[in-house]
Amino acid sequence: MDPFPKKESNDIKKIEKQKIWDETAKKVEKITDGLGLGIDQKIKETVIALIVNDYSADASCEGHIEKEHGLPYPWVDIYAPAPEGWQKSDELKNQWRQENLKQREKMQKFLKEFYSQRKTDDAELILQNRGALGAFRIQSQGAESMENRPKQELQEKINLYQKEIHDFSDFLKEKYFSQ
C-alpha cells in the first residue's frame, strides 16, 4: 500500500490548477476593450483570480490619475454571462439576475473571510450595484470620493487601493489553489 497517495493526488490537482491558471492568463492577455486596449497591467492578476474562481469579470481598471483614461481607483465589474434573448424575456432577465446574485453572495463570503483578520480604512473592498440585474463592481470604499482630491493625495490613495485589491487577488489565488 502506498503511504503517500493523498500527497500525489494533491500534487496532480495543483498541476492541473496551475495549468488552468496559466491558460486563463493567456486568454486574459488577449482581451481588449472597445478601444483595442488590453486589460491594465496592475489589475490583470485580479481578473485572472476572479475568473478561475468562477466569476465573470466583465470590465476592469487599475486606476488612473488621468481622468480621460479611466477612473481614479481600481475596480472590476462582475456580470454573469447574459442569456441569449434576455432583452425580450422577463423569465430570462430573472434567471440572469439570479445568477448575478449568486456571484454576489459568494463574493460577500470571500470578502467577509478576507477581512476577518484584516483592518483597513477606506481601502476596504465593497460591492457597488451595477444596473438593475444584480451585477456589481468590486472597489474600495473610499473610491467614490476620489474625484476632488489633490493630485499628490490622489496618487497615494490609488496606490493604497491598488495594494488592497492586489492583496485580495492573492487571497483569491490562495483559495483557488487550496480547494
Image (cartoon, rainbow, N blue to C red):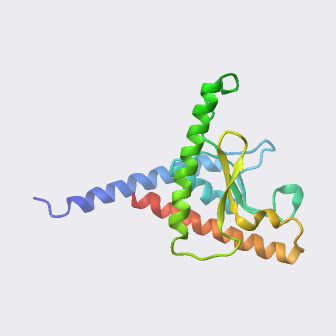
Q: Identify the residue at horizontal 69%, vertical 68% (top origin).
A: 162
Q: Identify the residue at horizontal 52%, vertical 48% (top origin).
A: 23
Q: Identify the residue at horizontal 51%, vertical 58% (top origin).
A: 109
Q: In the picture shown, does residue 35 fall above or below 46?
A: above
Q: Based on the displayed image, in which of its 4 quarters is residue 148 positioned? A: bottom right
Q: In the picture shown, does residue 40 fall above or below 98?
A: below
Q: Determine the residue located farthest toward the left in the rendered image.
A: 1
**Could you tell me residue 69's position as x and y percent?**
85, 56
- Of the 4 image quadrants, the one containing the N terminus is bottom left
Left or right of residue 76: residue 22: left
In this figure, what is the number of numbered marks?
0
**Could you tell me residue 76's position as x and y percent?**
68, 54
Q: In the picture shown, does residue 141 fall above or below 55?
A: below
**Could you tell me residue 9's position as x and y percent?**
28, 56
Q: Nearer the viewer, residue 27 or 137?
A: 137
- Of the 4 image quadrants, the one containing the C terminus is bottom left
Q: Identify the residue at horizontal 65%, vertical 64% (top origin).
A: 125
Q: Nearer the viewer, residue 99 or 176?
A: 99
Q: Based on the displayed image, in which of its 4 quarters is residue 35 positioned? A: top right
